[in-house]
Amino acid sequence: MESVTLNVTGMTCGHCVKAVEGSVGELKGVDKVAVDLANGQVKVNYDSSAVSLKDIKETIDDQGYDVN
Amino acid sequence: MESVTLNVTGMTCGHCVKAVEGSVGELKGVDKVAVDLANGQVKVNYDSSAVSLKDIKETIDDQGYDVN
């Protein structure tokens, strides 16, 4: 299991938190996802043999947010 | 038909727009609702014989926003 903290811009409210946590959390291989709204960060624990960091980033991007 | 423009704080993104427009738009007696996100305003056209301004304000409040 690996852990990554991504800097994500554009998340502003509880709906955004749900959109990111919900979509990333549904990915096979993702164990835990937590949004820190105040700091614009998304922390993800995942199994890199089941899901790639690229897929995680694309999922966040698909929700309309920029991953830096 | 009457028209009112409410000042609403806490709306920050497209999800918020949908939450307010969706919930207010579902009220019987509401003809049109439009959120101006940049200015924090919600414009509502409604039939005051079918829905009260109080109900409209409470619906927005129930979505987690402050009507001033």
Image (cartoon, coloured by chain):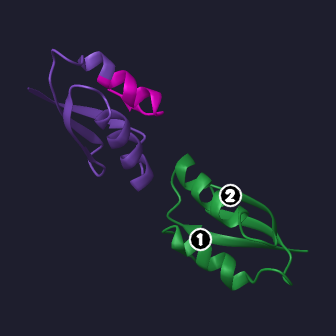
Chain colours: A purple, B green
Q: Give the farthest residue toward the left.
A: A1
Side of A49 relative to A62 (left or right): left
Residue position marked by numbered label 2 in the rendering: B35
Query: Looking at the picture, how far across and down is residue A65, in whole percent?
Result: 43, 33
Tell which tag, 2 or 1, sits nearer the viewer.
1
Question: Where the N terminus of chain A falls, by quadrant?
Answer: top left
Badge 1 element: helix
Q: Secondary structure at mark 2?
A: strand
Dividing the picture into quadrants, the one containing residue B33 is bottom right
Q: Amino acid at mark 2?
A: Val
**Viewer-nearest residue: A3 or B6:** A3
Q: Residue at x 42, y 47 (%)?
A: A16
Badge 2 or badge 1: first in the primary sequence: 2
| Quadrant assignment, res B48 | bottom right
Instruction: Kindly identify the amino acid type of the residue bearing the numbered disc 1.
Output: Ile
The answer, for residue A13, to whether it is visible in the render is no
Task: Give the residues in magenta.
Answer: A56-68
**The one of A37 and A50 positioned closer to us in this rendering:** A50
Q: Quadrant of the C terminus of chain A?
A: top left
Looking at the image, which residue is at 16% across and 18% down?
Answer: A48
Q: Chain of mark 1?
A: B
- Residue pointed to by mark 1: B60
Near mark 1 (Cα within 10 A), the count class, few <14, some 14-19 or many ≥20, is some
Give the CA separation, mark 2 to mark 1.
11 Å
Is A19 contained in the magenta span?
Answer: no
Subunit of mark 2? B
Q: Residues within 10 Å of mark 2 (few under 14, many from 20)?
A: many
Relative vertical location of residue A39 with respect to residue B59 in this rendering, above or below:
above
Residue A5: x %, y % from top left:
19, 33
* Residue A64 in picture, x, y percent from top left: 48, 33
